[in-house]
Image (cartoon, rainbow, N blue to C red):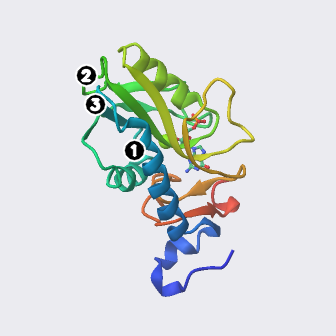
Amino acid sequence: MQRPARGRYNPRMLDDLERILIPQDVLARRVRELAQDIGRTYADSPHGLVIVPILAGSIIFLADLIRCLPFKMRIGLIAVSSYRGTAPAAHGPRVIQPLNVDITGRDVLLIDDILDTGNTLRFVREQLRERNPASLRICVLLRKPAKAPLDVTADFVGFDIEDVFVVGYGLDYNDLYRNWPAIGVLRPELYS
Ligand code: 5GP
Ligand code: MG
């Protein structure tokens, strides 16, 4: 894939990328399409849509997506820690901050940056189901079909990608690169 002109990006981030997987303009176009799909799905919702983003990876996607939605909606915040296998205190996902809005009888759309093993989304979905929403759907920007589990399916998917470690547009490595405006593949020597 062709590299963008150097001056347009922070060179220190660009140097850490092996390649750009999804450029900014492609992301922007697809996010607008997703918003149209979501808009059609909930256009006649009598219940009121509550979008629940899984922090922090989905923040950039969320911000762009909801500004394309043409109707009133609410955001519900829940904070979940999902240490992955290599973390010192490895454990499954757990709730750090419970959901801050009432979703009983409402249409809920759970948003995450990427559907990988599905452990995080499976866990949060169960947390939300216990609160009896009228409906519960899942939207992810990225999905790795090589790994995606059969029991956690997304209703809205931005892009299916190969099984590589990506950063940017909200996705981090070590809490860095979230502000990179496109999706890039991190140079493997930086995390292996
Ligand atoms: P899962 O629980 O589905 O295995 O993982 C979901 C979370 O793992 C995502 O929300 C994301 O934070 C992280 N993750 C999975 N794959 C990637 C990746 O390729 N890049 C980054 N930056 N995070 C990932
Ligand atoms: Mg995440």
Report whether residue 176 is seen: no
User: Is disc 2 placed on a helix, strand or loop?
Assistant: loop
Of the numbered discs 2 and 1, the one sitting upstream in the chain is: 1
What's the residue at 43%, 47% (across, down)? 58
Q: How many marks?
A: 3
Ligand 1 closer than 8 Å to the CB at disc 3? no
The CA span between labels 2 and 3 is 11 Å
Ligand 2 closer than 8 Å to the CB at disc 2? no
Q: Amino acid at mark 3?
A: Gly
* Residue 79: x %, y % from top left: 36, 32
Question: Which mark is drawn over residue 102?
Answer: 2
The CA span between labels 1 and 3 is 12 Å
Question: Which mark is drawn over residue 39?
Answer: 1
Residues 68 and 8: in front is: 68
Report whether residue 17 is seen: yes
Q: Amino acid at mark 1?
A: Gly
Answer few, some or many: residues within 10 Å of disc 1's Cα (few below 14, many 20 plus, some between 14 and 19): some
Ligand 1 closer than 8 Å to the CB at disc 1? no
Q: Amino acid at mark 2?
A: Asp
Answer few, some or many: residues within 10 Å of disc 2's Cα (few below 14, many 20 plus, some between 14 and 19): few
Of the numbered discs 1 and 3, the one sitting upstream in the chain is: 1
User: Is disc 3 placed on a helix, strand or loop?
Assistant: loop
Question: Which mark is drawn over residue 48?
Answer: 3
What's the residue at 33%, 31% (across, down)? 45
